[in-house]
Image: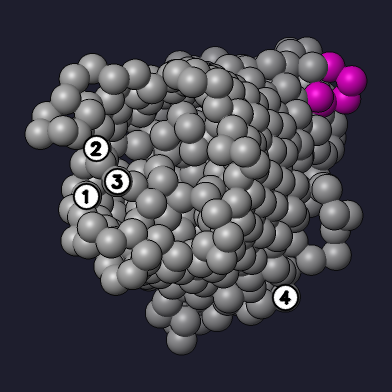
């Protein structure tokens, strides 16, 4: 006896038809979906202070910024004043979908905070050449990814009908065992109906070969971020050691809408339908970061950092909804909200960096980071994630991140520029297919606003513009046997400001 399809679909409960992978779209099958979700949640598109982003994040060896708390925490050891800073940001995303030579552009604006934090600094030794000089403690929130993105395109089709897909999926099953978030919706809205007996169905919509209009809309929102508690010490102004403990927060919402319309009046009964799939995910995780920086010369620094995986517990809510417009009226049916909990282990990361200071005016940083995405793991692996974990092992590979940044001091002003490249995390694809390029420029100033017990107080203001460029593709409908794709070009524009007080 066949099992009800509901049991089969519980394995891959979230049947959303597209996937954002670090704001990049790629095709996937349902059995791969959670593997791609793992990549999305593991990939880092870090924010921070405007100074940190302005230098391309290349501060692993240079230090002296609160954003080092999530990069190389040893960099906090260079801070010599207690400080507090806040970094509001504006995020603009523009995505152009090119479907069969027609271009469609969608945009999204988000206001958020890239970094909020404070560092307490205490000097322990007046002799600058020996012993512990400073012991610093920091607490900060740092945004680590931004999922906000919208896509829309439409066209015509003579190869696929989701109404026919509903019909085919229902054949052989009585209405009471139809999948509640798929073919039962079509049954409830009179898009399909039984004929002859209780397990044979007819399609009251359009056939695969009928010419129809369709549209695809994807609405994505959410982010990941860390609350980090860090400590760092400065030994003899030569050796800097630090560690951070992080609590990670994840929230993500995706809404996919697919419509079909009888543009040529081929059917006497069917006019249009919209199939909506929604997922809302939230998660909580923990991680640890440790780092070291050594300064053999006043003008040269070298650093190393190691990041453990983030161990996430994730909860998902999802539902599907189908609305139809027929000659007999308009109908709508929504599935019950489904709940699903699972665990994710993200990749471990290693980072090496060097920093140069020339004539105390120009600081140059170069960072290299390694993350192997084939080390991601979904649990419980002995149950529904066997296929996904095998796919992770075979499809994903190591990703290489290179950061280069420079800061020119023209007291009290500073000018900055940075470049950040993240290579393709997929195997067997051209190097730049799924790569990200981040280019930033920025400026700031630091001014004295008073003195307290012979220590000067400072006001710091920085401003940075960051653009991220990437490309990818998205299928018109992943339920089709033959997939058609829209090519995507995405530009993310990020304006960050930081206001800080040092005392």
Nearest to N terminus: mark 4 or mark 1: 1
Up the image or down, 267 lies above or below 503; here it is above
Q: CA distance from mark 3 to mark 1?
A: 6 Å
Q: Nearer the viewer, residue 492 or 444?
A: 444
> Magenta residues, as a range?
98-102
Instruction: Mark 4: give few (<14), some (14-19) or many (20+) Cα within 10 Å.
Output: few
| Residue assigned mark 1 | 121
User: Can residue 192 be found in the magenta stretch?
Assistant: no
Helix, strand or loop at mark 1: strand
User: Are discs 2 and 4 less than 8 Å apart at CB?
Assistant: no
- Residue 103 is at least partly visible in this image: yes
Question: Which label lies toward us, 4 or 1?
Answer: 1
User: Are discs 1 and 2 less than 8 Å apart at CB?
Assistant: yes
Instruction: Name the residue at 46% across, 86% down.
Output: 382
Question: Which label lies toward us, 2 or 4?
Answer: 2
User: Are discs 3 and 2 less than 8 Å apart at CB?
Assistant: no
Instruction: Name the residue at 56% across, 38% down.
Output: 360
Residue 83: which disc? 2
Residue 467 falls in which quadrant of the image?
A: top right
Q: CA distance from mark 3 to mark 4?
A: 47 Å
Q: CA distance from mark 1 to mark 2?
A: 8 Å
| Residue assigned mark 4 | 394
**Percent coordinates x, y for residue 73 in the rendering:** 39, 59
| Residue assigned mark 3 | 80
**Percent coordinates x, y for residue 325 in the rendering:** 52, 19
Instruction: Mark 3: give few (<14), some (14-19) or many (20+) Cα within 10 Å.
Output: many
Secondary structure mainly formed by the magenta segment:
strand
**Percent coordinates x, y for residue 385 in the rendering:** 51, 75
Instruction: Mark 2: give few (<14), some (14-19) or many (20+) Cα within 10 Å.
Output: many
Instruction: Name the residue at 16% across, 25% down.
Output: 451
């Amino acid at each position: 006896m066949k099992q009800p399809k509901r049991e089969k679909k519980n394995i891959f409960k979230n049947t959303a038809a597209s996937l954002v992978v670090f704001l990049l779209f790629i095709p996937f099958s349902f059995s791969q979906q959670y593997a791609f979700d793992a990549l999305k949640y593991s990939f880092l598109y870090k924010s921070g202070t405007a100074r940190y982003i302005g230098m391309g994040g290349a501060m692993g060896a240079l230090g002296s910024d609160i954003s080092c708390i999530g990069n190389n925490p040893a960099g906090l050891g260079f801070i010599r004043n207690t400080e507090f800073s806040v970094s509001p940001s504006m995020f603009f995303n523009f995505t152009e979908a090119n479907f069969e030579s027609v271009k469609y552009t969608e945009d999204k604006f988000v206001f958020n905070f890239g970094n909020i934090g404070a560092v307490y600094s205490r000097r322990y030794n007046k002799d600058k050449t020996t012993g512990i000089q400073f012991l610093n403690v920091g607490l900060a929130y740092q945004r680590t990814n931004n999922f906000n993105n919208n896509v829309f395109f439409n066209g015509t089709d003579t190869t696929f009908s989701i109404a026919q897909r509903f019909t085919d999926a229902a054949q052989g099953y009585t209405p009471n065992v139809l999948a509640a978030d798929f073919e039962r919706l079509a049954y409830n809205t009179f898009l399909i109906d039984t004929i002859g007996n209780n397990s044979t169905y007819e399609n009251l919509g359009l056939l695969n070969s009928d010419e129809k209009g369709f549209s695809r809309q994807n609405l994505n929102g959410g982010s990941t971020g860390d609350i980090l508690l860090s400590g760092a010490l400065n030994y003899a102004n030569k050796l800097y050691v630090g560690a951070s403990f992080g609590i990670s927060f994840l929230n993500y919402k995706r809404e996919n809408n697919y419509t079909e319309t009888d543009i040529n009046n081929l059917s006497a009964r069917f006019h249009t339908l919209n199939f909506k799939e929604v997922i809302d995910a939230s998660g909580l995780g923990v991680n640890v970061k440790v780092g070291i920086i050594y300064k053999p010369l006043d003008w040269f620094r070298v650093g190393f950092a190691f990041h453990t995986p983030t161990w996430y517990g994730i909860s998902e809510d999802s539902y599907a909804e189908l609305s139809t417009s027929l000659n007999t009226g308009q109908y709508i049916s929504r599935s019950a909200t489904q709940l699903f909990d699972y665990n994710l282990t993200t990749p471990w990361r290693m980072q090496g960096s060097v920093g140069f200071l020339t004539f105390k005016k120009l600081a140059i940083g170069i960072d290299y980071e390694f993350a192997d995405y084939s080390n991601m793991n979904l649990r419980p692996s002995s149950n529904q994630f066997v296929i996904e974990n095998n796919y992770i092992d075979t499809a994903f590979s190591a990703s290489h991140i290179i950061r280069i940044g420079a800061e020119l001091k023209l007291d009290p002003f500073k000018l900055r520029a940075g470049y950040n490249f993240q290579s393709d995390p997929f195997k067997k694809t051209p190097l730049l297919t799924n790569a990200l390029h981040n280019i930033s420029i920025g400026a700031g100033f630091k001014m004295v606003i008073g003195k307290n017990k012979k220590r000067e107080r400072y006001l710091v203001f920085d401003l940075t513009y960051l653009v991220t460029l990437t490309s990818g593709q998205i299928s018109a409908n992943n339920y089709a046997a033959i997939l058609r794709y829209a090519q995507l070009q995405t530009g993310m524009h990020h304006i960050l400001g930081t206001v800080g007080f040092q005392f």
